[in-house]
Image (cartoon, rainbow, N blue to C red):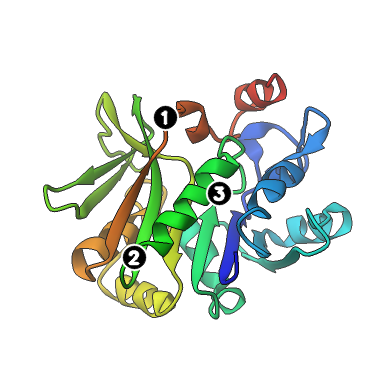
Amino acid sequence: MSGVVAVVPAAGRGTRLGRDVPKILVDVGGRSAWSMLSGRLAQVASHIHVVLSPEGQALFEQVARPPTPRTRVTTSVQPSPVGMGDAVFGSWSCWRHADRVLVVWGDQLGVSVKTLRRAVDAHRALEGRGIAVPLVRMTSPYVSYVFDNGGRLVSVRQAREGDDCGNVGLSDVGTFVLSAEGLEARWREYLAGGDRRGAKTKELNFLPLLSWLSCERGYEVARVMVDDADEARGMNTPEDLAWFQGR
């Protein structure tokens, strides 16, 4: 567990969910989304850093509690919701000294402790700098990962950006483990290579960085295969919330 910092981008306003609080504080069957997710993250990381909107940070710090007495919880602000990549690297000073950074979306309530542990262990097993990504094969994926025969991650297609993700593909479960050393410098190199904003959202996304690291900087990508497609489900809509409340 030493050397792992979990970074949770949660700066979205949650408008699609129809609630008046940040998604990470939404009540899900008598527990907040934060308590559900943080309890799992505490199994693999002693430090959890949450990136919030300005109004979300104030509310979070009033009501959220660390999942265990030994877990350090810190927060920072993403002034404007301009993308997950911007959220992760805007908080670089909070994870810069870690061995590895575990990025988990703030609404990713389906991910299991088993998957988190497997992802961290898979990353530890890599030689040199690398990435571990839990993946699940599913129909009609919202995100699709494409590898070449040599194991390089050549692209991450996103339906939200207008990409064709195919009828069947490898999707993620909103969980990523990366070597922290030198990562912020790689992000700056990535941004310097051209306009990296999404074609439709115009956001600075996180996922295209992964394929760039694999193809342009030689990062090894460990695929952690997950059997349960429910782990890929996030809490984005009222229908998603009802589904999680019914579990």
Q: What element carries label 3?
A: loop
> Label 2 vs label 1: CA separation?
23 Å
The correct choice, above or below, for 224 with respect to 66 in the image is above
Left or right relative to 231: residue 147 = left
- Residue 220: image x %, image y %? 27, 62
- Quick one: label 3, few (<14), some, or many (20+) residues within 10 Å? many
> Label 3 vs label 1: CA separation?
20 Å
Query: In what quadrant of the picture does the C terminus appear?
Result: top right
Tell me if residue 22 can be seen. no
Could you tell me the amino acid type at mark 2? Gly
Could you tell me the amino acid type at mark 1? Asp
- Residue 103: image x %, image y %? 52, 57
Circle 1 sits on which residue?
A: 227
The correct choice, above or below, for 186 with respect to 16 in the image is below
Could you tell me the amino acid type at mark 3? Trp
> Label 3 vs label 2: CA separation?
20 Å
Circle 3 sits on which residue?
A: 105
The correct choice, above or below, for 110 with respect to 140 in the image is below
- Residue 56: image x %, image y %? 74, 55
